[in-house]
Amino acid sequence: MQKKPLILVTNDDGITAPGLRCLIKIMNELGDVVVVAPDSPQSAMGHAITINSTLYCSPITIDDGEQIEYSCSGTPVDCVKLAVNELLNRKPDLCVSGINHGSNSSINVIYSGTMSAAVEAGIEGIPAIGFSLLDYNWEADFDAARNYIKRITLNALEEGIPENVVLNVNIPKLKENEIKGIKVCRQAKAFWAEEFDKRVNPQGRNYYWLTGKFVNQDKGQDTDEWALENGYISVVPVQFDLTAHHAIQKLNTWKLND
């Protein structure tokens, strides 16, 4: 009898997030599921890890299912590290992170706790996928994404993900019959034009709220932003080798050793 794949599930919105609960149900159809997720929201934590305070991780039961679950006091990356090094008796066959409440397309991948958890799994040699839905509402409808998430995950399990690559999957806020399909894309060149809303508290001390506008500079039709704006699910292969290989030749012309 063939052994079921072991699937590690995590997120950055917290253990009770509806997106995570939906992802758990989908993964229960595909393998043996272990969940290790933050005990509170950890959005935009990037690849942060806990080094100056204690970490707590406890078994928890939230809803029905065959999954084993743990609630962790740390970041999404902490959750993956704890799972691999302390909680699991074998390396997972796949790690899935999400379903995030909100976009992680384009430059957002840098800040995303959802994607950082997937990247950490990739660093550990585990095939990994981050899933995000373009709806920040806590009560977002994830049903339209279910079949597509299952299809992408099955392909990852059967075909394998290229070495040293993780997948960043973003899903438009549409009904299932409105989604046109899945496109493999590149990351759009974009940035946040940030502003700080400066205020003064009753004690006279300045404080700030970060605000801003997302600016897409990329007019290409092969990007994640184009796909999402045109009704497609975007799949971007992300590498965690940050070396700018194209720049090495130029830097070697510098007079560094004269």
Image (cartoon, rainbow, N blue to C red):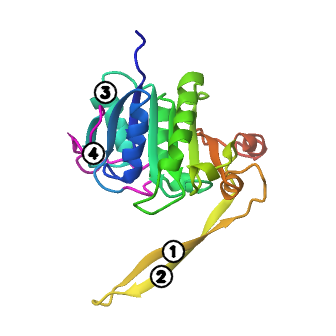
Closest to the observer, 162 or 185:
185
Residue beneath disc 1: 211
Magenta region includes residue 60: yes
| Residue 145 visible in the snapshot | yes
Residue drawn at (48%, 48%), measured in percent from left and top? 143
Tell me which numbered mark, 4 or 2, is placed earlier along the sequence.
4
Closest to the observer, 64 or 87:
64
Q: Outermost residue toward the front?
A: 177
The residues bearing labels 4 and 2 have C-alpha atoms spaced at a distance of 33 Å
Residue 111 left/right relative to 225:
left
Residue beneath disc 4: 72
- Report the disc number at residue 197: 2
Magenta-highlighted residues: 42-67
Element carrying mark 3: loop
Occupied quadrant, residue 182: top right
Tell me which numbered mark, 3 or 1, is placed earlier along the sequence.
3
Q: Residues within 10 Å of mark 2 (few under 14, many from 20)?
A: few
Image quadrant where one finds the N terminus: top left
The residues bearing labels 4 and 1 have C-alpha atoms spaced at a distance of 29 Å
The residues bearing labels 3 and 4 have C-alpha atoms spaced at a distance of 14 Å
Name the kind of residue labelled 1 in the image: Thr
- Residue 141 picture location, percent across and down: 46, 55
Name the kind of residue labelled 2 in the image: Asp
Element carrying mark 4: strand
Q: Residues within 10 Å of mark 4 (few under 14, many from 20)?
A: many
